[in-house]
Amino acid sequence: MGAFKLLNDTEATIDVRLAHRKAIREAVGLDIVEAAHNPDKLSELLDALADSDKLWQIVSVVSGISVDDLLANADGSTEEEAGTALLESLISFFPKSSPMRNPLSRLLEKAKEQHDQQLQTAEAMAMEVVEGLVIGSGISDAEASTSG
């Protein structure tokens, strides 16, 4: 099971169950049971999680919250957290004997590591740009033109 918080402070719980199989198949054309046993179908499922529209459709099915309500209370961080929660729930959904469970767990770990690295790199680049800006002359020019 996974969970994430919407911008309106509602916690959305994601708990993938067999009862969701048909609704997910109808929503995005993927069978979660097939994905638990077939690497090609698992790859299709993971591709769907990378597609924002499909991600929110699946999250809607398993959370019981409409796509419109989810999107009305979500931003980029919320989408990230929803994707992580869905992946965590899928890992729990797959049988312990499924050959897909361990690779999915490793994928989640790698995704978190890569995300952390990307954040550090982006922050360092942004700081470099900010430190290189010359803003003093812009401020003094603005003050000079408005005084008088």
Image (tube, grey):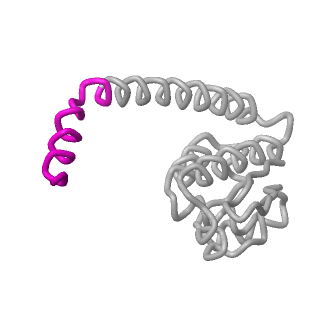
In this rendering, would 124 be left or right of 80? left
Which x, y percent locates residue 112? Answer: 61, 30
137 part of magenta stretch:
yes
Residue 118 picture location, percent across and down: 47, 28
Above or below, 31 against 114 in this view is below
Instruction: Judge whether 42 appears above or below 55 on screen.
Output: above
State which region is magenta: 129-148
* Magenta-drawn stretch, dominant element (helix, strand or loop): helix
- Residue 55 sits in quarter: bottom right
Front residue of 74 and 140? 140
Q: Quadrant of residue 68?
A: bottom right
Residue at x 84% of width, y 48% of height = 1
**Residue 114: percent from left, percent from top:** 53, 27
Identified at 84% across, 66% down, the residue is 19
Relative placement, left or right, of 74 versus 95 is: left
Q: Position of residue 54 (x, y in %)?
A: 55, 62
Q: Is 18 situated left or right of 135 in this image? A: right
Q: How many marks?
A: 0
